[in-house]
Amino acid sequence: KQSNKGFTIIELLIFVIIIGVLAVIIIPQFGGSAERDKENQVRDFAHYLRITLRNRAIEGHKLPEDHVGVNQLSFLFTRRYVHPITGEMVTVQHPDSCGAWDISYKLIANTDSLYLGQYELRGYGKDPKTPMFVLNRF
């Protein structure tokens, strides 16, 4: 009689499939791609806000006075952005109350000219104390 020690080909195939599925789930988290996706989402929304503000200026409107005014322009947004952590719709925050993955707006100067005044958009990543980027309109 032969002794049948070891695994069948089916058992080995199932093992390889399970390892493959786990690798697909775990490796991107270690590679930082999830965090890069969040950063890209914040950057995309900030650039979209910048375009929206520019278009409003071209139409002859003044800059919003604060973050509340920017959020009131949400009816103009053709795209909706969801906060990568909370899952809620992204809104613009006051510069002093930003958390991780937020965007702040600060009016520096408003003018009546066609090409608007000055403002600053800051995008925050994992660290809410240090902005990932600053978009200025001077």
Image (cartoon, helix red, strand yellow):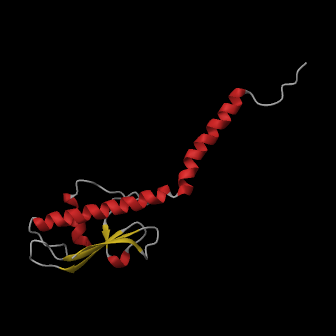
Left or right, 6 with respect to 22, comes to right
- Nearer-the-camera pick, 86 or 51: 51
* Residue at the image position 54 percent from the left and 55 percent from the top: 29
User: In this view, which residue lies farthest toward the right?
Assistant: 1
Give the residue at the far front of this rendering. Answer: 138
- Residue drawn at (36%, 70%), measured in percent from left and top? 133
The answer to whether 29 appears left or right of 1 in the picture is left
Q: In the rendering, at what x and y percent does residue 85 appear?
A: 44, 60
At 13% from the left and 68% from the top, the residue drawn is 57
List x then y, in percent, for residue 62. 13, 73
Tell me where residue 71 appears, x and y as whole percent.
25, 66
Check the image and report above or below for 60 versus 16: below
Residue 132 in which image quadrant:
bottom left
Residue 73 visible from this viewpoint: no
The correct choice, above or below, for 58 with respect to 110 in the image is above
Extreme residue toward the bottom, this view: 109
**Residue 8 visible:** yes
